Image (spheres, grey):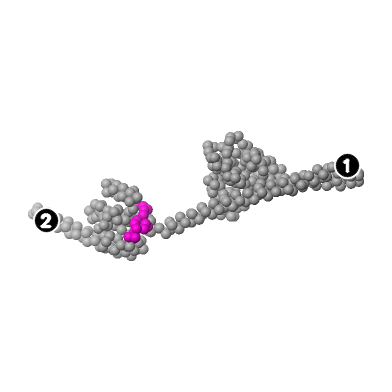
Amino acid sequence: MLCLGWGVTLRREAASRKAVEKALCGVETRSREMLENIKLIAVIVDTDGNITFCNDFFLNVVGWRREEILGANWFDSFIPPNQGTVKRLFDSFRAEGAFPVHLQNDIVTRDGKSRFISWNNTVLRDWSGQISGIMGIGEDITDRINAENALSFYREQLEKLAAELSLAEERERRRLAADLHDRIGQSLAFANIKTHTLREFVADGGRRHLADLMGLMEQVIQDVRTLIFQISPPILYELGLEAALEWLAESTQQERGFPVIFSDGGESKPLADEMKVTLFQVVRELLINAAKHARPAQVAIDVRRRGNRIVLMVKDDGVGFDISSVSINPRAHPGFGLFNIRQRMETLGGDVAIDSLPGRGTTVTVSAPLAHGRHDSI
């Protein structure tokens, strides 16, 4: 009776095993049908790396026939020799049973070209729970990556062109400022001297008119000097960025009516002319922004050297703004120039940090690399 009982039990286990195998076979059949119909690459390899399944979409990508692929080793046939990381991951999988779910790598087609594939991987197990291989569902993202690379290249070219345009604009500004100084400025100065010498030849009745003329000449000369500095301040090239920023602080204070405090750490800060001009323009734009939108009682400009970088901070105690709302829709905020500044500085290897809260003022910190034996001529 005991033997009969064991026989019945064994027959039941066998029947149960056959039922499970039949169910698994049905699932596998439906899964393969699904893999054939999706518009993605589908490949299954066993624990030796040999291909046991591939769909038609994969065949169209690589250009091989199914009978040429099935049984072939995946790594010998499709992985470029310079991408040994994939093979090492598979070797680790064979030893430990774990494989990355997400993976990107090149595969080689029949004509020797490479396609870049983004994979989603699943470790497969048989009916007994033993690892039987890996199924990879892949998307060919070659064209997308190429398009992104091309876009990045054109963006870099555009940024380079914008930087070159800015340099060309500054050269023209310097030429125009020099012409104003050498021609109009000197002519006005000479005319002013001549006007002063006329005082002893003018009768009492005309001296009041001559004084008015002399005052007008002085004002015109001052206006031309101010215009020259606004176009391209000579002090920026003759004495450096720190001196130019100090002059800018004083000039802004006189024009706008609020105190602008300038401080400098005193360290040596060698800068290429391109960077020097850009930083000066950035600070000038920040001061204009503060005057227009912040309504500050005071603005502070601080320049320091930190390692091989220059760090420039412009801080106001004005109305401030909500940075998060501006980052979502920067054009809706009057301080949109801050984001143009960030883009301009990033093009030159710098960065910009903006700290602001409504009612708490705004601090803009600009960091940029110092020059290392390179001084562009503008």
Q: What residue does disc 2 label?
A: 7
Q: Secondary structure at mark 2?
A: helix
Q: Quadrant of the N terminus?
A: bottom left
Looking at the rendering, which quadrant does residue 122 occupy? Answer: bottom left
Q: Is residue 182 left or right of residue 280?
A: right
Residue at the image position 53 percent from the left and 40 percent from the top: 372
Q: Position of residue 76 (x, y in %)?
A: 29, 54
Count the labels in the image.
2
Q: Between marks 2 and 1, how big is the CA–CA gap?
A: 140 Å
Q: Which residues are magenta?
A: 98-115
- Residue at horizontal 50 percent and vertical 55 percent from the top: 154
Q: Residue, x 16% and y 57% (percent of image)?
A: 14
The residue furthest top is 266
Query: For the residue marked with disc 2, what is the amino acid?
Result: Gly
The residue closer to the viewer here, 18 or 377, is 377
Of residue 171 and residue 40, the one placed in the foreground of this image is: 171
Q: Is residue 282 above or below residue 56?
A: above
Furthest toward the right, the residue is 204
Residue 188 lies in the magenta-colored region? no
Residue 123 x %, y %: 30, 53
Q: Amino acid at mark 1?
A: Glu
Q: Position of residue 77 (x, y in %)?
A: 29, 56
Which of discs 2 and 1 lies nearer the camera? The answer is 1
Residues 270 and 365: in front is 270
- Sequence-wise first label, 2 or 1: 2
Residue at mark 1: 200
For residue 151, say whether it is visible. yes
Q: Is residue 298 visible?
A: no
